[in-house]
């Protein structure tokens, strides 16, 4: 998938910290960036997850669609610590800077504030 190749390029270019944001019965969302304390630049969402083997934090991960597994796709995620597997219906990638704190009126076009951030008076 071209989207995953772009995530891999971003990971190699310094957006190398990735963390699981949410994981439930249906989806797993990973965020990645240079400094996850302040923002993320990429979000990888696996939909229709039927099995996952992935740690909470990854460093310089590479994502690969390993092909069909029944009605789902088998995704392989490799980082410095090992190889992990996700079986899901599909994956979506969102790119763009998402701040983890309120920046008030300082947002540039295409930037946004993470939904969990408590916003100041607007």
Image (cartoon, helix red, strand yellow):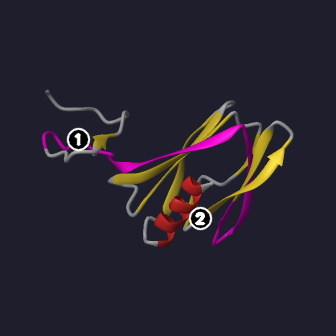
Residue closest to the far front? 2
Image side of residue 35 versus residue 21, left or right: left
Q: Is mark 1 on a helix, strand or loop?
A: loop
Magenta stretch contains residue 120? no
Tell me the magenta residue range. Answer: 77-105
Image side of residue 7 versus residue 65, left or right: left
Q: Is mark 2 on a helix, strand or loop?
A: loop
How many marks the image carries: the answer is 2
Residue at image mark 2: 61
Residue at figure coordinates x 69%, y 33% from the top left: 48
Q: In which quarter of the image is the N terminus?
A: bottom right
Residue at figure coordinates x 67%, y 70% from the top left: 81
Q: Examine the residues drawn in magenta and state their main secondary structure.
A: strand
Residue at figure coordinates x 44%, y 64% from the top left: 15
Reply above or below: 105 against 54. Answer: above
Q: Position of residue 69 (x, y in %)?
A: 84, 45
């Amino acid at each position: 998938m071209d989207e995953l190749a772009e995530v891999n390029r971003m990971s190699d270019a310094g957006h190398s910290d990735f963390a699981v944001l949410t994981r439930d019965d249906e989806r797993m969302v990973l965020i990645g960036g240079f400094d996850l304390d302040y923002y993320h630049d990429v979000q990888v969402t696996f939909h229709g997850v039927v099995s996952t083997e992935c740690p909470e934090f990854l460093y310089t991960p590479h994502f690969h669609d390993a092909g069909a597994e029944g009605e789902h796709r088998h995704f392989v995620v490799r980082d410095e610590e090992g190889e992990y597997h996700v079986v899901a219906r599909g994956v979506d990638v969102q790119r763009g800077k998402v701040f983890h704190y309120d920046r008030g009126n300082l947002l540039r076009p295409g930037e946004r504030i993470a939904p969990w951030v408590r916003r100041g008076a607007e």
